[in-house]
Image: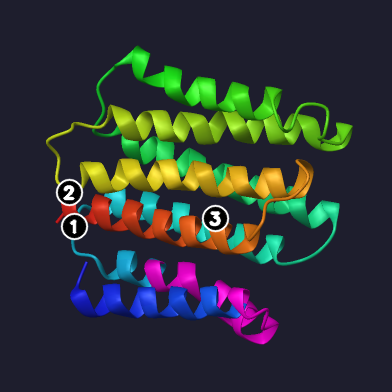
Amino acid sequence: MMTKVTIGYFILLTFHLMGISLAYAPLSATTKPLLMPYLIVLVWNHKGGIKSRWILFLALLFSWIGDLFLMLSGEQHFIFGLAAFFCAQVCYIRLFLMTSSWRPLFFLPFLCFAALLLGGPLDGKIPPPLQLPLYAYTGVICLMGYTASLRQPLLPGYAAVLIGAILFILSDSFIALNRFGGGVQGADLWIMFSYGLAQYLIASGWLKQSS
């Protein structure tokens, strides 16, 4: 990504995190819906491969829709947000599979993490109506992380994409733990820091490959 774009995105993310830290809702609520559009414009203007650009564009678009739903209260909005992010993960999986090779053992760390999360602090804490959606989403985001690890290691941006995928999993884990696992100190800050960095690393890493 261009230096000016990188600086602009992280200035925006910093203001958002400041709004969270200072508990100043007008700042955090104004900046959060701008994060994904900022990256979407960058992807839209990218001159690399058209096919991969569209898939990445859709992943960021679904993420933005998910952000908007999760800003609203209520279980129904949470489910809609989860569905939007599910679609985003499917797009990322499709994107990563374009340059992947089969390495089944790489799935074990992601499987173990999901098992520890769902069988540990979240065990018995998820309301029945949300169990199936959350289990499905846990599966798809772990698959997203796995497919990120399957990409060719020598590709430009490989490490950035993989780290971004792992941070995305951690961000959503913080959401689940904060909502159902009894709370996490400074959860909102950790969620948005890891999420904002994750999306940037995935997008910038992929654009390096398709430049």
Q: Decide which of 7, 56 is in the foreground and name it.
A: 7
Residue 23: within the magenta? yes
| Element under disc 3 | helix
In the picture, which quadrant includes the C terminus? bottom left
Image coordinates for residue 85, horizontal then vertical, percent: 58, 48
- The residue lying toward the viewer, choosing from 165 and 83, is 165
Mark 1 highlights which residue?
48
Residue 28 picture location, percent across and down: 61, 78
Task: Tell me the amino acid under the disc marked 2.
Answer: Gln
Instruction: Report the amino acid beneath label 3.
Output: Phe
| Majority secondary structure of magenta residues | helix
Badges 2 and 1: C-beta atoms under 8 Å apart?
yes
At 39% from the left and 80% from the top, the residue drawn is: 11
**Can you identify the residue that label 3 sits on?**
62
- Disc count in the image? 3
Quarter-wise, where is residue 63 in the image? bottom right
Q: Is residue 28 above or below residue 46?
A: below
In the image, taking residue 200 as reference, residue 100 lies left or right, namely left
Q: Which residues are magenta?
A: 20-39
Q: Which mark is residue 103?
A: none
Disc ID at residue 209: 2
